[in-house]
Amino acid sequence: MTPSDWTAVVAAVAIVGLVGGLLVTLAEVRRTLRSLRKTLEEVSADALVAIEELRLSTREARFEIDRVDALVSTAESLTGTVDSASKLAYRTLSNPVVKAVALGAGTKRAIQRLSNDEPPPARKRGRRNLRAKR
């Protein structure tokens, strides 16, 4: 064999080795792609389940928010009604109650004076009386 034949044989063996290496590499890539495809299918199925659960949770949360909004609106309405009622009660009852308390206090003093037979106390001089005397 001539040196060019040896070179051709070595080149052919090297090419066969490279092709074999490429085939092994391609087989590994194919196996990895199958594994990746299987993993993606599992993730996709899990994601679909999670998305459906999120939709249900969102609907429930929206329903609860609507309920809480209705409760807050009712509470605000009741607060306004109670506030109006308390103002009305205050305006309606404050003047008669003050008059009744004053009447009771005056009656109590009158009874005390009548029972002790004391003369009425002297009136205190106000500022106007003091100014008039100066």
Image: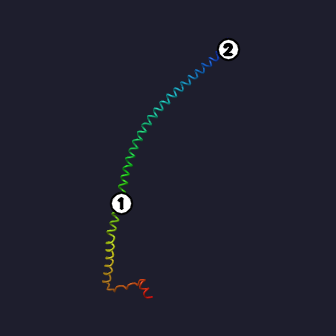
Q: Which mark is residue 4?
A: 2
* Element type where label 1 sits in the image: helix
Q: Which mark is residue 10?
A: none
Coordinates of residue 104 in the picture (x, y in percent): 31, 76
Q: Is residue 100 above or below residue 16?
A: below
Q: Which residue has dot 1 on it?
A: 80
Colour scheme shown: rainbow
| 32 or 82: nearer the viewer | 82
Q: Is residue 43 above or below residue 109?
A: above
Residue reaching furthest to the front = 132
Coordinates of residue 9 in the picture (x, y in percent): 64, 15
Residue for point 32% across, 79% down = 106
Residue reaching furthest to the top = 1
Separation of marks 1 and 2 at Cα, in angstroms:
107 Å
Residue for point 33% across, 76% down = 102
| 33 or 95: nearer the viewer | 95
Q: How many marks?
A: 2
Coordinates of residue 132 in the picture (x, y in percent): 42, 87
Residue type at mark 1 is Gly
Q: Which corner quadrant of the image does residue 89 belong to?
A: bottom left
Residue reaching furthest to the bottom = 133
Mark 1 or mark 2: name the one nearer the start of the chain. 2
For this view, does 20 lie left or right of residue 68? Answer: right
For this view, does 97 lie left or right of residue 8? Answer: left
* Element type where label 2 sits in the image: helix
